[in-house]
Image (cartoon, rainbow, N blue to C red):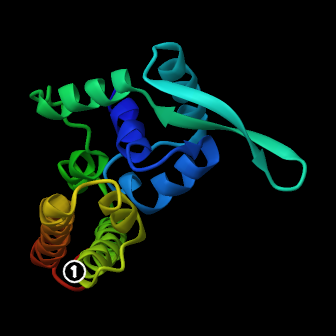
Amino acid sequence: MSLRYALLALLNVEPMTGYDLYKQFQSSVGYVWHAPDSQIYPELRRMERDGLLEGEEVRWGSKGRKRQYHVTDAGRDAFRTWVNSQLDYPRERDPMHLKAAYLEWAEPDSARRQLEAHIEHYGALLLQWRQKIQEIDGGSSDMLNRRLATVPEEDHGKVAAFKRFTYEGLTSRAESEVAWAERGLALLDELYPQGSA
């Protein structure tokens, strides 16, 4: 159900087409909620049917047309209600940590490659999220600037602070995952001294 609220978050900034929303998922909210276009388009239709959005056909290119969505008052109310409600935390699904619990079954070199891939994955995310923080701090975040254009100036500091807070949390999580995998590599060295594997 969070896909619905991620879409409302983006559409509260400005009206967008499904394609625009998909692109924004790739560069902003997608860092905290992944959704392929095969999920986005059906959800937009459901939201329109539920009265949270209004769609209208708009010109797209020289001959084409696309459906652009606007948030309704009911959509804004639903978003506000969601933001103010407590989360029901889903049960954890973490394939790498599950696999780590059984690495004694793995060849040491395979275990090492998997932990190195984990470090590479979270290291790349860490760079992206630190870049987002720099963009927020430097005033060059396109999505944030569009959001700020929709709120009173006295709220700009709050909006930017919460966006930064989100990326700080993602950064901390990535740093923790990198440190965990590095401890795993050290554990492999301890359990499988050079030449004993």
Coordinates of residue 181 in the picture (x, y in percent): 19, 69
Q: Taking 104 as reference, is 44 left or right?
A: right
Q: In the image, is 107 to the left or to the right of 87?
A: right
Residue 162 shows up from this direction: no
- Residue placed under numbered mark 1 in the picture: 137
Q: Looking at the image, which residue is at 55% across and 56% down?
A: 23
Q: Position of residue 87 (x, y in %)?
A: 13, 30
**Residue 24 to residue 59: above or below:** below
Point 39% across, 59% down: residue = 28
User: Is residue 18 shown left or right of residue 193?
Assistant: right
Q: How many marks?
A: 1
Give the x, y percent position of residue 117: 36, 70
Camera-side residue of 8 and 29: 8
Determine whether the residue tagged by mark 1 lies in a helix, strand or loop.
helix
Q: Which quadrant, please, contains the N terminus?
A: top left
Residue at point 30%, 46% (across, down): 95
* Quadrant of the rendering where the C terminus is positioned: bottom left
Q: What kind of residue is marked 1? A: Asp
